[in-house]
Amino acid sequence: MSAFEALTNALAAVLCVVGAFFFFVGTVGILRLPDFYSRTHAATKCDTVGAGSVLLGLAVLEGFTPAALKLIALAALVLVSSPTAGHALARAVYRGGMAPWTRPGHRSGGEPK
């Protein structure tokens, strides 16, 4: 194995581990956060950063092939569509009348009474 292959494999492994970490943290956020808006934020971060990192890691591992170009195009699509869909969903729910969660005993600015 050459030094270039070792560096490529290491970079791909780091990107995939970072992606798996963000998937895990996003999943915990979906389970633990208090309201719809916070959970939507966690889900879109999980998809965007997690899937984007894993797809870029796979593209690095693949090398300079047409399959790597497809993986990069898919990562770009995820990076654009996931936050857009999350924003549209949250905006529709907000316009539907669901109020964001606030901590009891605190004003909307976050300062105690």
Image (cartoon, rainbow, N blue to C red):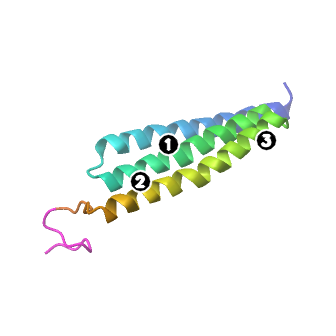
Residue at 74% in and 37% down: 59
Q: Is mark 1 on a helix, strand or loop?
A: helix
Structural crowding at the residue carrying mark 2, measured as other residues with C-alpha within 10 Å and reported as few (<14), some (14–19) or many (≥20): some
- Seen from the viewer's position, the closer of residues 32 and 10 is 32
Q: Are marks 1 and 3 in contact (CB under 8 Å)?
A: no
- Seen from the viewer's position, the closer of residues 97 and 106 is 97
For residue 34, above or below residue 106? above
Q: Do the residues labelled 1 and 2 touch (CB within 8 Å)?
A: no
Q: Earlier in the sequence, mark 1 or mark 2?
A: 1
Residue 16 in view (yes/no): yes
Q: In which quarter of the image is residue 73?
A: top right
Magenta segment boundaries in residue numbering: 104-113
Q: Position of residue 4 (x, y in %)?
A: 84, 35
Label 3, label 2: how many angstroms apart (C-alpha)? Answer: 29 Å
Q: Residue 41 carries which label?
A: 2
Q: Position of residue 7 (x, y in %)?
A: 77, 36
The residue pinned by badge 3 equals 69
Mark closer to the observer (1, 2): 2
Residue 7 in view (yes/no): no
The residue pinned by badge 1 equals 22
Q: Are marks 3 and 2 in contact (CB under 8 Å)?
A: no
Label 1, label 2: how many angstroms apart (C-alpha)? Answer: 13 Å
46 within the magenta span: no
Label 1, label 3: how many angstroms apart (C-alpha)? Answer: 23 Å
Q: Where is residue 27 in the image (x, y as percent from the top left)?
A: 40, 39
Structural crowding at the residue carrying mark 3, measured as other residues with C-alpha within 10 Å and reported as few (<14), some (14–19) or many (≥20): some
